[in-house]
Image (spheres, grey):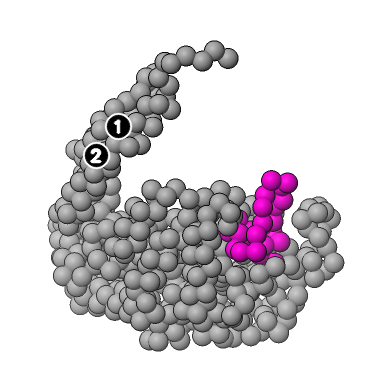
Amino acid sequence: MKYDNKPTVSDRLREEAFDFKLLEQAKNYALDYMGNILNQPVFPGQEALQRLHAFIEPLQDGPSNPYDILENLHLNGSPCTVAQTGGRYFGFVNGGIVPVALAAKWLSDSWDQNAGLYVISPIASVLEDVCEKWLVDLLHLPSETAAGFVGGSSTATLCGLAAGRNYLLEQQGYDVAKKGLFGAPEIRVILGEGAHSTVYKALSILGLGSERLLKIPADNQGRILTEAVPELDNRTLLILQAGNVNTGAFDDFSALCRKAKDAGCWIHVDGAFGLWAAASQELGYLVRDVDLADSWSVDGHKTLNTPYDQGIILCRKRDALTQALHMTGSYIIYSNHRDGMLYTPDMSRRARSVELWATLKSLGKKGVSELVEDLHHKAVYFAERLAENGFTIHNKVWFNQVLASLEHSELTGKMLSLIQSSKECWCGGAKWGNHSVIRISVCSYRTTYGDIDRSVNTFIEAREKVLGDTPQQI
Ligand SMILES: *Cc1c(COP(=O)(O)O)cnc(C)c1O
């Protein structure tokens, strides 16, 4: 190949890599965004959304100026975000962002570490180890419990159920990793009818089907009816829930885990946002005996307020987890230290343990407990204020979720549309029993009691408008 001195793309990028002004500019835009967040519409209005057209274009041939790229993102991208880091976003179950975790993420983004193996990143490996120990302690799980750091609870659940499926089949003398599911002994999957959709997704990926599941009816809070659970055995994968995505309710772990444990089931707990109750004195009663389970999935990016991309699979049997996710290759160098890829489906992965570590270090045990309780107290207050003002509340506020409505579903739907376009606050909707409801999730430390009062006013104004627009008041 002929070598000439024409500058290449690498030459240009190398030059940009030392242009620290570019990063200063990014910092200025970020600070501008964060400084304005409390004034920004909670959901972008139509005129802001028009800006998204700036991004819809064919990829050009040549390079673009890095300053122009950043400016485009800030001018046209920042206004089209939802103000999730403000105090009045109550949609889905999302969280805020602990300040030092954001700062640590900025720093570690500049490291660009691959957390796959100790030899690729000693710091990522050690922080994963430390976080594993801290989480086990904080959540009062069995001391031998292993943790894998993945993108979210969807993946964490997939890992826990893969470990459980393989373990149960191994107990039947069947190696599913080698022989596949064809001709495997049957195992049974039991879950509550209120299980999260990501559990169904994980089961279908794992070849456990959706029509073959045994769905146990739930009570009016979404909790498994304990007495409806059939005889259990050691061929059963039992999936329980800490925090129903609508009501926030918890299954009765004391009754169910004891029974399942005695029978030799594998018990997985989807605790995406609710497992954090285990870190609180006041709310710990909700997860009594949850430590009897075999695997637990939980998110950092909801209740704990870490940045996104922070799911954790916790598994009592370390070998069951690593064997389910194992891979080999002659160039892979396992060490005597922690090799993160053994605990996740990914090989290359960013060092997400940095932000988790920074969050836990920032809060301490007491801080996590206070944060969880504070979100609960604010959710209770939100529900009380709505009830005082004549709204119907459909759940007991177990944790941080509130379901509210008007008396008639159709009017609730109209009211929700007005709230969502109000720019003042944002909530999602759901069906609960026969009712259309508004789902409120209090997940961020940024939410103040003042934010809740302001949001309740938005609810009241929306109701007035809906009732005013409705000719005969029903
Ligand atoms: C959010 C949630 C999930 C999915 O978690 P992701 O982090 O979004 O993948 C699963 N179960 C419950 C109960 C949840 O609230």
**Numbered mark located on residue 66 in the image:** 1
Q: Is residue 328 left or right of residue 462?
A: right
Mark 2, residue position:
21
Q: Amino acid at mark 1?
A: Pro
Residue at point 46% right, 61% down? Answer: 353
Q: Is residue 341 magenta?
A: yes
Q: Magenta region: which residues?
A: 320-343
Residue drawn 24% across the image and 66% down it: 446
Pick whichever, 342 or 398, lies toward us.
Answer: 342
**Above/below status of 62 relative to 240:** above
18 above or below 239?
Answer: above
Magenta stretch holds residue 145? no
Is residue 157 among the parts visible in the rendering?
Answer: no
Place residue 104 in its image quadrant. Answer: bottom left
Disc 2 residue type? Lys
Some atom of ligand 1 lies within 8 Å of the CB belonging to the residue at label 2: no
Q: Give the mark nearer the N terminus: 2 vs 1.
A: 2
- Badge 1 element: helix
Q: Main secondary structure of the magenta part?
A: loop
Q: In this rendering, would 179 be left or right of 431? A: right
